[in-house]
Image: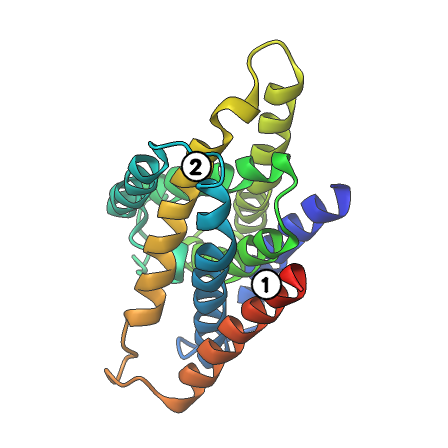
Amino acid sequence: MIWKSLLLFFCAFLGGMSVFFFKGDNHKQLRLILSFSGAYLFAITVLHLIPDAYHGNDNYVGVFILIGFLFQIGLEQFSDGIEHGHIHVNEGGAFPYGIMISLCLHGFLEGMPLAEGQHNQLIYGIALHHIPAAFALATVLLHSKRGKGSVIFYVALFAIMAPAGYFFSDALSRGGIGNLQHYFNRIMGVVIGIFLHISTTILFESGPDHKFNERKLVAILTGAGIALAGFLSDVA
């Protein structure tokens, strides 16, 4: 699992560090990555995560999916939608504590189900999703007049949250505190709800010109296609 933790960390960290190499506010490539990751997240949620969560015949899984969906709505009241790449800058403003705390909690929760050895598709989906989120976080920090060292520190803090969620849930399941297996599907249900909210928000948002352009469509179809190919290879 070490390589997976490193993948999660470095995708988020390098995504945040890329803010120092992109100038201006028109980040077209970032929006394409966002569209790709949204489609990929939605596809693996429908193809892998939802069927797996219901496999244990837990009648309350749907309740926890709904909780996760609503919980993400609540988080976004503090994060300003930064989880799906929204950038709302406040020039010279105070440190964005609400954004930082909600984004770290979001990342930690997403890492928890990985302790049960979920499909690699989930690892890749989280890693991809964190690239634009980390970029948006770094952009907000820069515009709030944080120094370069401060930006690097807080991006690294966010990047470590998903691996930390994994290690926490793994330690919980191995120790005497409790057995993760008993409530794993419910934790997965919360994450599914979060993924459904984020991915559908990305997919159904219009661009700045309120058009669903061809490049975004190609990115979405590519993301969904790769997830589908992975699913078909697993069931073959």
Residue bearing mark 1: 231
Considering depth in this image, is 202 or 196 the residue closer to the camera? 196
Instruction: Classify 30 as above or below 93.
Output: below
Q: Residue furthest top?
A: 176
Label 2: how many Cα within 10 Å (few below 14, some 14–19, many 20+) = some
Residue 200 in sight from this viewpoint = yes
Find numbered disc 1 in the image and state the secondary structure of the residue it sits on: helix
Considering depth in this image, is 228 or 23 the residue closer to the camera? 228
Q: Residue drawn at (48%, 34%), measured in percent from left and top?
A: 56
Instruction: Please indicate whether residue 187 sits to the left or right of residue 231 in the image.
Output: left
Find numbered disc 2 in the image and state the secondary structure of the residue it sits on: helix
Q: Which amino acid type corresponds to the residue marked 1 in the rendered image?
A: Phe
Q: Which mark is residue 41?
A: none
Q: Give residue 197's position: percent from left, percent from top.
A: 32, 54
Mark closest to the chain's N terminus, 1 or 2? 2
**Whether label 1 touches label 2, CB < 8 Å:** no
Residue bearing mark 2: 105
Instruction: Classify 152 as above or below 19.
Output: above
Q: Which amino acid type corresponds to the residue marked 2 in the rendered image?
A: Leu
Q: Residue drawn at (27%, 86%), measured in percent from left and top?
A: 211
Instruction: Please indicate whether residue 20 sits to the left or right of residue 188 in the image.
Output: right
User: Where the N terminus falls, by quadrant?
Assistant: top right
Considering depth in this image, is 96 or 198 the residue closer to the camera? 198
Q: Quadrant of residue 83?
A: bottom left
Considering depth in this image, is 157 or 73 the residue closer to the camera? 73
Q: Give residue 219's position: percent from left, percent from top.
A: 48, 79
Q: Give residue 222's position: percent from left, percent from top.
A: 53, 78
